[in-house]
Amino acid sequence: MTADDSFGRLDDDDYPAYTMGRAAEMLGTTQGFLRAIGEARLITPLRSEGGHRRYSRYQLRIAARARELVDQGTPIEAACRIIILEDQLEEAQRINAKHRRAAQSPNPPATA
């Protein structure tokens, strides 16, 4: 990948553009916090060729939500579980809405 290719990916929410130090700085937290939510499997940062953790903007938004819950007194493990459940609920609601729209369609798709 060339420098021009990398620059073009900065708008990509999934591009791992941030080092652990920069991510912690942006979130106003510690690198240990990022390691903890990684160990809880809330986010899995990509690794550079040298083995350093790299975070995407999407992962930073998730980490910011975890930090918000922890700042309110929620233990890290519980905060991670809450966020995972919130994500699952959002996905289920999206699927349900899709099925509702299909059922209300004048020509519902045939089932096998």
Image (tube, grey):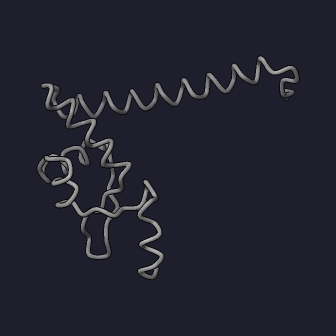
Residue 107, given in percent of the width and then of the height, sits at: 88, 24
Q: Out of 67 and 4, give the one closest to the viewer.
A: 4
Measured along the vertical axis of the image, is residue 3 above or below residue 41? below
Q: Out of 3 and 82, give the one closest to the viewer.
A: 3
Q: Is residue 50 left or right of residue 97?
A: left
Q: Residue at x 42, y 32 (%)?
A: 87
Measured along the vertical axis of the image, is residue 1 above or below residue 101? below
The image quarter in which residue 73 lies:
top left
Residue 71, given in percent of the width and then of the height, sits at: 14, 31
Q: Is residue 31 left or right of residue 62?
A: left
Residue 78, given in percent of the width and then of the height, sits at: 23, 28
Label tally = 0
Q: Residue at x 87, y 27 (%)?
A: 110
Q: Out of 110 and 54, give the one closest to the viewer.
A: 54
Q: Is residue 46 left or right of residue 109?
A: left
Measured along the vertical axis of the image, is residue 108 above or below residue 13? above
Measured along the vertical axis of the image, is residue 3 above or below residue 87? below
